[in-house]
Image (spheres, grey):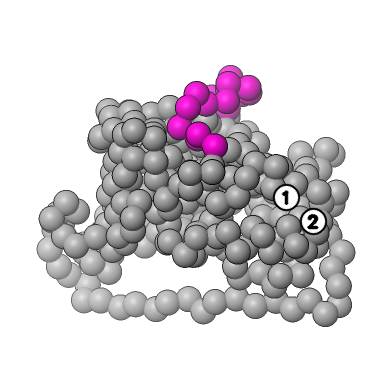
C-alpha cells in the first residue's frame, strides 16, 4: 500500500532491500526517450548505471542551488464561473495548449478547495512527466486517443494504458505521470485537482527539476559518463510542459506494457480508496 506523502528519489538505482528506486524507473524507456529527446539506449543507461540508491557519495566541490518560489495575492471574493475553453490559455506550444483556473484567478476556489485545468495535445505531442505534491488529479479525457503512464514513488510502473474520449483516470498526489497523444490523433482532457493552488514539478522540458541540479550531481546521481549527461541535457527541449515528439523517438502511443498490470491495478485501487475514504 502506498501512503501519501511517501518520499521518492529523482536519482539513483533500485534498492533491493527497501524496494526504493529513482522514480524515473516507473516510466517506460520509450516514453522517457520521447520526453527527453534522446534514443532508448541513452535512457537505459541513466537509471541503471548508478549502483547506489538513497545515499550516494558526491565530490566536495558540488554545491546546491534552487529557484525562489513565486508569491501571489488576490481579493478574497470573485466570480463563481470560469470558462476554460473561451479564456486565453496560459501555455501554448507547437504541441498544444494548457489553461487552468486556481484560487488566484477565481478566489471562491479557495473555499471549495479545488482547481481545474484543460489540456489539448496535438497529434504526436507529450505532456511532460511530472507530479503534484499537494493535489490528487481526477482526469477526464474529452477527445482523441493516446496513452497514459503513472509511476510509483518506488520507481515501479503503476499504470500504462491506452486512453480515449470518455475515460476517467485518478492520479494520487506524489505519483508522477505522463500523457502521450497518438501519432495520428490529438488527445484532450480536463483535470480537477483537490487543491485551490496545486503545485507541479516536471522531469522533462524547460521546467525540468533536473535543470536545478548542479551538473556534477547529475553525473554522480546517475553514475554515467559526463559526456552522456551533457548529451541528455543538450537534447532537452526549451518547450514548457507540452512537448513535441522528435521523429527519432520511438512510438510511445502503441500498445502499453502489460507486465505487472495486475499489480498496478491493485495498487492503484488501494490509492484511490485512500483518496475517497
- Pointers 2 and 1 in contact (C-beta within 8 Å): yes
Look at 69% across and 72% down and name the residue there: 214
Look at 71% across and 70% down and name the residue there: 215
Look at 36% across and 62% down and name the residue there: 197
In this rendering, position of residue 156 left or right of residue 197: right
Mark 2, secondary structure of its residue: loop
In this rendering, position of residue 105 left or right of residue 23: left
Quarter of the C terminus within the rendering: top left
Spot occupied by residue 267 in the image (x, y as percentages of width and height): 58, 29
Crowd around label 1: few <14 · some 14–19 · many ≥20 (10 Å):
many
Spot occupied by residue 246 in the image (x, y as percentages of width and height): 48, 48
Quadrant of the rendered image containing residue 106: bottom left
> Which residue bears the numbered disc 1?
46
Residue 25 part of the magenta-drawn span: no
Quarter of the N terminus within the rendering: top right
The tag on residue 238 is: none
Quadrant of the rendered image containing residue 101: bottom left
**What predominant SS class does the magenta segment belong to?**
loop
Give the residues drawn in magenta, as a range: 250-266
> Which residue bears the numbered disc 2?
224
Crowd around label 2: few <14 · some 14–19 · many ≥20 (10 Å):
some
The answer to whether one can see residue 138 in this image is yes
In this rendering, position of residue 251 left or right of residue 84: right
Q: Is residue 217 above or below residue 142?
A: below
Spot occupied by residue 116 in the image (x, y as percentages of width and height): 29, 52
Amino acid at each position: 500500500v502506498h501512503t501519501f506523502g511517501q518520499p521518492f528519489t529523482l536519482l539513483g538505482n533500485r534498492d533491493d532491500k527497501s524496494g526504493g528506486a529513482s522514480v524515473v524507473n516507473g516510466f517506460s524507456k520509450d516514453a522517457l526517450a520521447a520526453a527527453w529527446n534522446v534514443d532508448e539506449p541513452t535512457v537505459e543507461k541513466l537509471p541503471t548505471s548508478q549502483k547506489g540508491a538513497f545515499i550516494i557519495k558526491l565530490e566536495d566541490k558540488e554545491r546546491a542551488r534552487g529557484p525562489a518560489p513565486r508569491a501571489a495575492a488576490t481579493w478574497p471574493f470573485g466570480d463563481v464561473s470560469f470558462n476554460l475553453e473561451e479564456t486565453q490559455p496560459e501555455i501554448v506550444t507547437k504541441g498544444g495548449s494548457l489553461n487552468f483556473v486556481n484560487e488566484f484567478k477565481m478566489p471562491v476556489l479557495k473555499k471549495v478547495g479545488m482547481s481545474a485545468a484543460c489540456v489539448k495535445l496535438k497529434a504526436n505531442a507529450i505532456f511532460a512527466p511530472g507530479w503534484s505534491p499537494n493535489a490528487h488529479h481526477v482526469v477526464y479525457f474529452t477527445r482523441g486517443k493516446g496513452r497514459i503512464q503513472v509511476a510509483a514513488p518506488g520507481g515501479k510502473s503503476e499504470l500504462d494504458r491506452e486512453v480515449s474520449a470518455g475515460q476517467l483516470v485518478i492520479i494520487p498526489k506524489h505519483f508522477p505521470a505522463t500523457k502521450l497523444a497518438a501519432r495520428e490523433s490529438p488527445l484532450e482532457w480536463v483535470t480537477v485537482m483537490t487543491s485551490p493552488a496545486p503545485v507541479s514539478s516536471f522531469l522533462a522540458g524547460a521546467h525540468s527539476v533536473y535543470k536545478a541540479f548542479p551538473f556534477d550531481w547529475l553525473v554522480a546521481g546517475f553514475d554515467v559518463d559526463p559526456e552522456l549527461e551533457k548529451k541528455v541535457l543538450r537534447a532537452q527541449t526549451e518547450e514548457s510542459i507540452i512537448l513535441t515528439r522528435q521523429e527519432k523517438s520511438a512510438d510511445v502511443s502503441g500498445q502499453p506494457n502489460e507486465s505487472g498490470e495486475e499489480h498496478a491495478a491493485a495498487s492503484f485501487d488501494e490509492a484511490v480508496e485512500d483518496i475517497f475514504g
